[in-house]
Amino acid sequence: MDLMELLKQAQRLTNETNTDTEVPGVERTMSQVLQATKEFHSRVTQMGTNDLQAHILLGSKGVDLPKLTQKLESLSARQTFEPIDPVTETNVQAYLKNERENAILSVIDETNRSIFKSVERQKWRCIYSEWGEEKEALLNALVGPNQQDFPDVQFQIVPTAMADEPTPYSQLNGHEQMYAEQIAIHNQSIILGRRPNLLSTLAHVVQDSFNDESVAEMWNVLQFMTALPPVSSTIDPIKNRQTSPQFVEQARTYLERRYRTYMRKFIVANLAKARRGGIPSVYHMVRSYVGVTLQGQRALYGLHDVNNGQPLWPHVYYSLRSGDMDAAALYLKESGTCPDLLTLLTLRKNGDRDNLMVKLEGQLKLEYNSRLRACTDPYKKAVYVVLLACDPHFTHVELMRSIDDFLWMQLSILRRSDQSDSNTEQLTFSGLQSLILEKYGENYFNAREKAALYFQVLTLTGQFEAAIEFLARTEKNRTHAIHMAIALNEISMLGTPRSVEQSLLSSDPDDPKPMKRLNLVRLIVMYTKCFERTDTTQALHYYYLLRNFKSENGRGNVMLTCVCDLLVEKCDDEMLELIFGTEDKKNGLRYGGIYAEFQIHECDKYSLAEMVGDELSKRGDYELAIELYFIGGQLDKALRLVNSLLAQVVHQPTQNGSVRNRLGDIINRLDAALVVRKSDVEVQVVVTYTVLTKVMKFFDHYHEGALRSALEILTNNHLIPASSLEVDECVTNIKRMGPEVIKVLPDILLASMDIVYQEYVKLMDSNETASGFFDESKCVNKEPAVKHLRDRAKAFTNMAASVPYRMPSTTNQRLVQLEILMH
């Protein structure tokens, strides 16, 4: 192809591509076109076809790809949502940015986890559902057995009968019912003037009827610790327990008696070795016991001194451990050793406390500190420590085989404050109590599994309150703990807090450490709440035990408060009959009932009924409150509540089952009671009640259509004016009435205006004179009647404007509207 032909084709193509718009022409030489082509080819080979296509595509959409690429390269390419490391430099902007990104990542991570958990739950739910459908299908596919394979069984229908008056199922188990029976018997004895020992009674019941040795042992130790002369109820139990040495003596005696029992059982189990003989005494029992336990072990224990071929100090120690000082003195006398110790033992046995005894104690303590601290005979050291009450920190590891041994040793070295020596360190009763309760505590004694052991340790150290509170924390022993606390309180040996609002176990600032006080009220209330509705009689007997505790809310004693709360929660006819007895229809009084058994000062049923009525009134249950006021003889309070209710419903029409309908029966009872006891009620209350009952009759006639009778009631009682001249008189009369009457005055005026308007409409539509409100002999045409009706309507609006109380705007509007319609 020559150049001319090529030129012609180019011109033809140019003509074909011509458009209407003017496009500037591009004139390039062949060398310029070749250079541009090479440059374009080099860019394409460097960037690649994909990048080129991306540039073309995004460029057509208005996206600057190079700039976008720079932004993407500045982002952090993280593979997972790991938390961003905190910024160490004090750069506030970077720190806030870091915290924001960490918060976003944490939300994303938490969302992912919740989604995975939800998906997992949904998956297993679907699996279980599908498997349930498969099981159902498999069971339905099974072929049923042949009926001939089974014998013909004749089913016998057992007739059942339901009691006419079914009683609720008791919530008390066997043990709780036994306890409740004894509480009821004890209360009856108290009411009759007797004062039995409830603790001894309950301990015997547990011993005879409960098949539980651990519970019986707990009651036994509590009974033994309280077997002391009666204490006056005016003396604080905590202070008496801490200052009286009798409790320490009782605890030590209990441990000594139990150890004697243990030794007897041990000797019986080893009769062949013991060679007891036939003389029943502690002296011979200790000899047999030592002969068995220390047979061939004298060298092992490093024992000193011999008496009749046997080691001396084990016999003396076990005689003291058994509580027999005579046997210990006899062993010392036979051996002829330590005459000073024998003299001290004799003086201690006789209870002497003179200068000779003080001198001997000083000499023997010097001997103990100088020579016996390094002694290898543990029994000899123990005897000196017990008789001298010294060295309280020595553990006596060789002899402490049980908690009883440890506790007996600690109780033996206690001294009263008047016998203490300021020059030597001695153990006090409070120190021992702190050691048991605070230093060792429940974990040391494994109290969860050995509750009886820990209870006995606390009881033997005089910490009755802490021991009972520990038992009350376990479901198994809670019932026993509650009755232990009741029994202790009945003999004035339980420390209770000053306020019944305290926690179950509290500390008093005036008490020595670590003594606690137990809130018996809270303990009994928590216990009885479980069965007070099903076993109301038993619950009342428990509440009777709280008659001497004063309530914090000023409602008398706690017994009244508890019974009041019970009645407020469940106050129906059945409960009222159970508590207050059956009502006599003739005089309205109630006779019988459970509460009649507790007729004592501040606990009579009339005070209780009044208290329950007040509480129900505060809660807005007015009808039940009125019934309780009737029972309590509070006619004035009943009238006030009836007035309040009448003011709310007196204008309503009568309906079966409504409050207004039920108030009719109450009004009949009040009318009968006012005939006899009108002087017991304030005059203002009686006047308000009388007016409201009249208004109630007015609205009854009004809703029944007896308009003439309705207006006559209001006119006779001067509640509304018959004309404009009587407006001032009616307003003055209204001012003397109670607020309950004022409250229904708008409804009275509206009803009266409606009656007048109806008569006006009836009169205007008839050709006869109205005889509903006028004397027919004086009315010969409509004009006087219409004028009288208009005057009366005007009197109503004037009265509404003259009453010194703010009338509802709708009432005034309605009155004015009806008056205008009558003109």
Image (cartoon, helix red, strand yellow):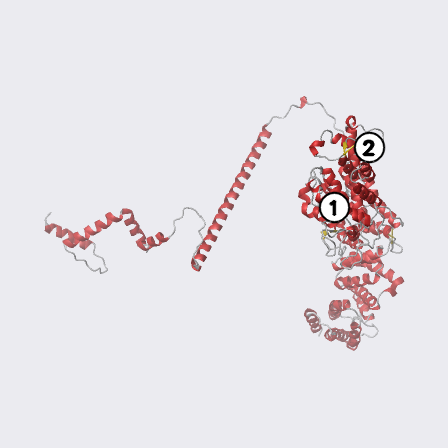
Please tell me how crowded label 2 is: few (under 14), some (14-19), or many (20+) other residues with Cα within 10 Å: some
Rendered location of residue 135, percent (x, y): 58, 32
Q: In this view, does 571 lie above or below 803?
A: above
Q: According to the image, label 2 marks what residue?
A: 284
Tag 2: amino acid: His
Pinpoint residue 802: horizontal percent, then vertical percent: 74, 75
Q: Which residue is situated farthest in the top direction here? A: 149
Q: Position of 157 compared to 24: left or right?
A: right
Q: Quadrant of the C terminus?
A: bottom right
The vertical placement of 700 against 43, above or below, is below
Q: Is mark 2 on a helix, strand or loop?
A: helix
Q: Position of residue 580 (x, y in %)?
A: 84, 52
* Residue toward you, 706 or 572: 572
Q: Residue at x 39, y 51 (%)?
A: 76
**Front residue of 166 and 759:** 166
Query: Mark 1: which secondary structure?
Result: helix
Mark 1, mark 2: which one is toward the viewer?
1
